[in-house]
Image (cartoon, grey):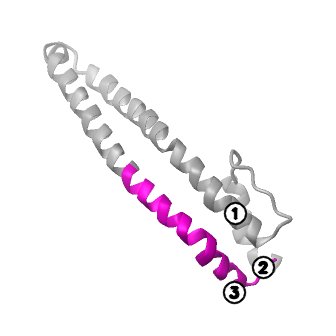
Amino acid sequence: MKTASELTDFYYETLYPTLQELEKDRKNLRYRIVIVGVVFSLICLVLIFLLSSFIQQSPDILIFIGVGYMGIGGFIYKFLIKDYTSEFKQKVIKPLIGAIDSSLSYQVASMFHKEFLSVQICFHSLIE
C-alpha cells in the first residue's frame, strides 16, 4: 500500500496529464451529445407534427412516442459515451488501482455492485 505522498506524486506525474487529455475529449463528447440530442429532438418534433391528425384521433400515441423518444435517446447516449467511459477506466482507474497496491487487479469490463460499496462504506472504520 502506497503512502499519500507517493499517491500525490503519482497523480501529478502520471494521472494529471492523462486527465487533461480526457478533459478535452469530454468537452468534445459533450458537444457531440448536445448536437445529436438537438437533431434527435427535432426529428421527433417533425414526427409529431406529421402525425398530428392521427394524434388528434388517438392521443395515446403521444405516450408511445414519448417512451420511444426516451428509450432511443438513452440508447444513443450510451452509445456515444461508451468509448469515453472505457478509455477513462483504462487510462485512469486501472493505473490508479495498480499504484495503490500492486496486488490489486482491475478488470475494465467489471464493476462494483452497489451492495458491495454500501458494505464497504458501513464497515470502513472496522477495516482500517
What residue is at 69 percent from the left and 79 percent from the top? 7
* SS for callout 3: helix
- Can residue 6 be seen at all in this image of the molecule? yes
The N terminus - image quarter: bottom right
Seen at 69% across and 44% down, the residue is 109
Does residue 72 appear to the left or right of 38 in the view shown? right
Q: Tell me the residue that label 3 is attached to.
A: 5
Question: Along the horizontal axis of the image, is 107 left or right of 91?
Answer: right
Q: Is residue 100 above or below residue 34?
A: below
| Residues shaded magenta | 1-28
Res 27 → quadrant: bottom left
Task: Decide which of tag 3 and tag 1 comes sooner along the chain.
Answer: 3
**Residue 59 at x, y = what percent?**
22, 21
Residue behind mark 1: 95
Q: Which residue is mark 2?
A: 2
Q: Is residue 37 magenta?
A: no
